[in-house]
Amino acid sequence: MKGRRVLIVGINYAPEPVGIGPYTQGLAEALVAAGAQVEAVVAKPYYPQWRTMAGYAGGGWRRAQEQGVDLVRCPIYVPAEPSGLKRIIHLASFALSALPFALRAALRRRGERPELVVVLAPALLSVVTAWLAARIAGARLWIHVQDFEVEAALATGLMSGGSWPARLARWLEARLLGLGDRVSTISPQMCAKLRDKGIAAERVFEMRNWSDARFAPDPAGAAAIRAEWGLGARKVALYSGNIARKQGIEILVEAARQLQEREDIAFVICGEGPNRAELERLAAGLGNVQLHDLQPAERMGAMLTMADLHLLPQIAGAADLVLPSKLTNMLASGRPVVATTEPGTGLYAEVDGCGTITPPGDAAALATAVAELADNPALRESVGRMASQRAAERWSKDAIIARALGAVG
């Protein structure tokens, strides 16, 4: 990559603390470290709160250089309640807002144009922006799929499967993905889905999300959080991340309800998102549930260490549409994971042996799994060691980035 010019187009970027943003940042900085000159056209940070972060609101486009990456932060429409239509407008607003700067990069004089254009999906609509820039610049187009957003919209009920918008969305998805010279995604099962969508096998490769070295175990910080939140010696079942439909996070409250007589177990949910208010309503009156805001990156290592086990709910049908990025850091923390998914899915394959897997929507099974792990410290320790080992084997950042750079050439 030494000396090559790379343009990245992606809606999410740091300082967003969770989701896709940290991985787009990591990829951009890894390309810089490999000797590339990188420009990234991204949105102003808004996720997972679904509001533009303080310090970034207003003022139109902003340019900056961060860790060697030339950044353009674009203004976009951010709905407070991201329904189906509002979400489409939100994604389209980024594709349009990014277009002038993507084209400006492509229209520079020869020798200064990008040789590789990388676009992140979501937002799939941004592929049009990136493709135009790549065609004008004579560059190769690399599409990286973090989330099959069309199928996720169908799985979560944002679109009806037989409706004309759904048919149009599937057709558009296939056409846009087909524009890539290389198309990557984050798990073997999602790679298979790309091939099922008509992408030739030789153009598909896997680039996993990696564990974040900033979130190293922090026992002292964990003890401080336990004291701050009044958790004492209770066994903590932790969920940290986005609170939205595809997580099916309501099952955690129902499982907590079934264990409310167990004063030694606490369900701690740290997160923000469009379903936060509804979750607070469901949890009202439950003394074994605590809801907190998403914690800053400097406290994440302590929080992950504070947990005795991690919770990873997913609704039925969503497990192979996205492999939750939070899983990597859960495993790296050396704590067992309780996930809701079906056998044969990518999530099942990643968690199997590193925790307990229960059927989606089965709150009783989830409650039983939490109680069994809470009551068996030897099992928690042995399964936690397996989790830590798997994170080291499958989610090493250096190995993942090196393999990806080799694949795109």
Image (spheres, rainbow, N blue to C red):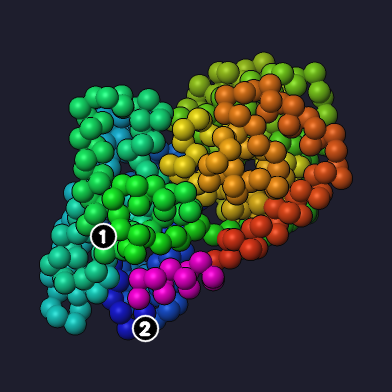
Give the magenta range: 398-409
Question: In the rendering, at what x and y percent does residue 401 appear?
Answer: 48, 69
Q: Which residue type does callout 1 highlight?
A: Gly
Say whether disc 2 or disc 1 marks the residue closer to the N-terminus: 2
Q: Quadrant of the N terminus?
A: bottom left
Q: Residue at x 83, y 44 (%)?
A: 379
Q: Nearer the viewer, residue 391 or 97?
A: 391
As rendered, which of 143 and 167 lies closer to the eye?
Answer: 167
User: Relative to 386, does residue 322 appear above or below in the rendering?
Assistant: above
Q: Identify the main secondary structure in magenta.
A: helix
Examine the rendered structure and indicate whether residue 112 appears above or below residue 261: below
**Residue at 19%, 53% in the rendered image:** 128
Determine whether 150 is above or below 406 in the image. Answer: above
Residue at horizontal 75 percent and vertical 50 percent from the top? 384
Position of residue 351 in the picture relative to residue 71 (left or right): right
Q: Secondary structure at mark 1?
A: loop
